[in-house]
Image (cartoon, rainbow, N blue to C red):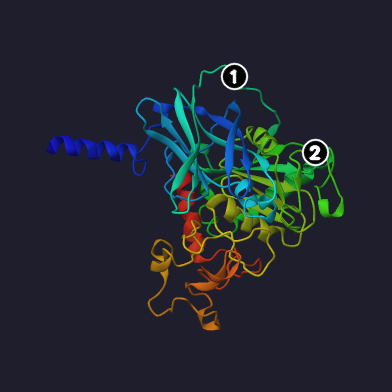
Amino acid sequence: MKTFIISVILLLALTSGKAQTVNFTDYFENRTMRVDYIHAGNNAIQNIYLEQIKDEPIWGGSKKNLIDPFNYGIYKVSVFDSISGLLIYSRGYCSLFQEWQATPEAKKVNRSFYETVVFPYPKKTVKMEICVRNKKNGFDPVFTMFINPADYFIKEEMVKVNCFKLYNSGDPDKCLDVVIIPEGYTKEEMEKFKTDAKKFAGYILETEPFKEYSGRFNFWGLEAPSEESGTDIPGENIWKNTVVSSNFYTFDSERYLTTQDIKSVRDLAANAPYDQIYILVNTDKYGGGGIYNHYNLCVSDNLYSKEVFLHEFGHGLCGLGDEYYTSDVSVEDYYSADVEPWEPNITNMVNFEKKWKAMIKKDVPVPTPAEEKYEGTIGAFEGAGYCAKGMYRPYLDCIMISLGAKEGFCPVCRKALVEMIKFYTE
């Protein structure tokens, strides 16, 4: 009986996905499987419908760290070996759909959003599962399917464009790869894009904590011209024919720049090895957007483009939450008062022990008064996550709350970013 109990414990440890190491070559080919789906519903319900599966030629992610240890994101994609049930890949992520669910419109109408997930191309049949975070901070499955990698309905066609190196540190599976996609740059403006992309890659490489780990980054650019220059500005009745159909006024927020054409985004990104997608939009209008493990967008020629670029990269790479609370936003009641936010840099004190509490010095009060003597000090300052009361941030000033932050990312955000960089590169 004792031997049986030990065997069961070992089996549970192997299948839990919390600590196991998966041998990449046992389960995967060195290319990408992409699953496209329609995400539809309203503020109370959601459904996922399969659209297509694609075989893409490059896998740019880690071949060592295949299981997500962070528990970030509203959604999680998990891939299991269909025979043993072993978890062989997982990633948390967010999407526009879950943001839209918190808007007033979602209470009145049903809508659909095109979404995708990617993972290494499996050698044998796998079970893929998409889960959504529940009110207890666990995950519930919303879509499950078995995928046979030899299925002849899996598409292989490519939207081919030229890929070029902007900054190279080494093999993609040992580096954090960022692909920069041009949006609203015409064929005649491709040289401008190349100059802009190199400049914006430099913004990351010269900013801590990325600067310290610059030898672990690769940046790639794509020559993908648009028919017209610029982007859609619906509030000004400006409409442009561009390669990934970006627009301002997302959810009626003028500065919120996004695209719902994730299909075109992924089709272009497939030409490069990538962990993160950054869409650089050719305009001087203020705005941007960043969605965790989905994509990042920023404008090219605004006075605050550098700061917005870094802020949005914090969202996209690490799931950092917005710390501001005085600006108008489109979402309502985005965070629950009785569930700890998953983002590493904001808290409602429900489970503060799992956040940055251990980084606060003993003589710093919690909550921490917003006083000059606590400037440059890690604490718990009220006001974060679009809420003036009941939500807390770790620093008086940080690029996640204001674009004029002197230190850029605060120590708590830097710690989270470093952990993510190491996950992709070690």
Under circle 1, the secondary element is loop
Residue nearest the viewer, comparing 128 with 107: 107
Q: Position of residue 248 (x, y in %)?
A: 76, 52
Amino acid carrying mark 1 in the image: Phe
Q: Dividing the image into 4 quarters, which one contains the C terminus? A: top left
Amino acid carrying mark 2 in the image: Ser
Task: Kindly report which numbered mark, 1 or 2, lies closer to the viewer in this rendering.
Answer: 1
Q: Position of residue 404 (x, y in %)?
A: 66, 69
Residue 104, placed above or below residue 245: below
**Which label sits on residue 391?**
none
For label 2, the residue is: 226
Residue 253 location, quadrant: bottom right
Residues at marks 1 and 2, CA–CA distance in whole angstroms = 30 Å
For label 1, the residue is: 153
Relative placement, left or right, of 361 versus 295 is left
Residue 198 appears in the figure: yes
Residue 425 appears in the figure: no
Residue nearest the viewer, comparing 173 with 4: 4
Of pointers 1 and 2, the one earlier in the residue sequence = 1
Residue 324, placed above or below residue 12: below
Outermost residue to the left: 1
Outermost residue to the right: 237
Residue nearest the viewer, comparing 273 with 332: 332
Q: Position of residue 239 (x, y in %)?
A: 85, 45
Q: Position of residue 258 (x, y in %)?
A: 70, 48
Bin the neighbour count of mark 2 within 10 Å (Cα to Cα): few under 14, some 14-19, many 20 and up.
many
Relative placement, left or right, of 99 versus 193 is left
Bin the neighbour count of mark 1 within 10 Å (Cα to Cα): few under 14, some 14-19, many 20 and up.
few
